[in-house]
C-alpha cells in the first residue's frame, strides 16, 4: 500500500513540474489569449481565456455520442476555434496545462488549427 501511495505522489509531482514549466514559458498578452486544454477520464474540455481571466470561448464533448475520445477531442478543438473566431480572436497561445502533447491534447490543437485558429 505504501508503494501505491508513493507512486501516486510521484505522478502528481511530475504533473505539477510539467504544469509549472509550461506556465512559465507561455507568454499570453492582451491580444494573444490562451487556449487551455483539460481532460478527465471521460471528457475533454477547451477554453480560450484572455489575460484577465475572462473566458472568450469554451467547448466540451459531453453532448457528443459517436466516435472515439480522440475524434471527439478533434471536434472540441474545431468548436472552440469557431466560437473564438466569432468573438474576434484569430490567434492564441496553446496551453496544454501540464498534460503531454499526445492523443486528445494534440487532437484539440489540430482541430483548432483546421478550423482556422492559429496556435
Image: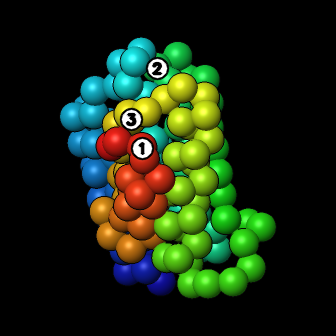
Marks 3/1: CA–CA distance:
7 Å
Q: Name the residue rendered at 39%, 35% in the picture.
A: 92
Q: Which residue is mark 3?
A: 92
Q: Earlier in the sequence, mark 3 or mark 1?
A: 3
Establish if 19 lies above or below 93: below
* Mark 2 element type: loop
Marks 1/2: CA–CA distance:
18 Å
Q: Is residue 21 left or right of residue 61?
A: left
Q: Nearer the viewer, mark 1 or mark 2?
A: 1
Q: Name the residue rendered at 53%, 76% in the picture.
A: 71
Q: Which residue is mark 1?
A: 117
Establish if 35 lies above or below 2: above
Q: Quadrant of the C terminus?
A: top left
Q: Nearer the viewer, mark 2 or mark 3?
A: 3
Q: Which residue is mark 2?
A: 51
Q: Earlier in the sequence, mark 1 or mark 2?
A: 2
> In the current view of this chain or complex, which residue is farthest to the right?
63
Question: Is residue 26 visible in this depiction of the protein?
Answer: yes
Marks 2/3: CA–CA distance:
11 Å
Question: Within the image, what quadrant is residue 4 found in?
Answer: bottom left
Q: Name the residue rendered at 66%, 58% in the picture.
A: 60
Q: Name the residue rendered at 28%, 51% in the picture.
A: 18
Contact (Cβ within 8 Å) of mark 3 with mark 1: yes
Q: Is residue 24 left or right of residue 82?
A: left
Question: Which is nearer the eye, 2 or 86?
Answer: 86
Amino acid at each position: 500500500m505504501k508503494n501505491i501511495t508513493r507512486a501516486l505522489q510521484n505522478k502528481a509531482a511530475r504533473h505539477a513540474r510539467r504544469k509549472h514549466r509550461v506556465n512559465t514559458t507561455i507568454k499570453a498578452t492582451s491580444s494573444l489569449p490562451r487556449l487551455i486544454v483539460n481532460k478527465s477520464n471521460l471528457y475533454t474540455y477547451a477554453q480560450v481565456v484572455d489575460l484577465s481571466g475572462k473566458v472568450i470561448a469554451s467547448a466540451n464533448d459531453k453532448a457528443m455520442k459517436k466516435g472515439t475520445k480522440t475524434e471527439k477531442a478533434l471536434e472540441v478543438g474545431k468548436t472552440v476555434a469557431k466560437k473564438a473566431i466569432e468573438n474576434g480572436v484569430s490567434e492564441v497561445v496553446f496551453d496544454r496545462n501540464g498534460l503531454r502533447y499526445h492523443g486528445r491534447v494534440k487532437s484539440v490543437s489540430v482541430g483548432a488549427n483546421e478550423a482556422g485558429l492559429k496556435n
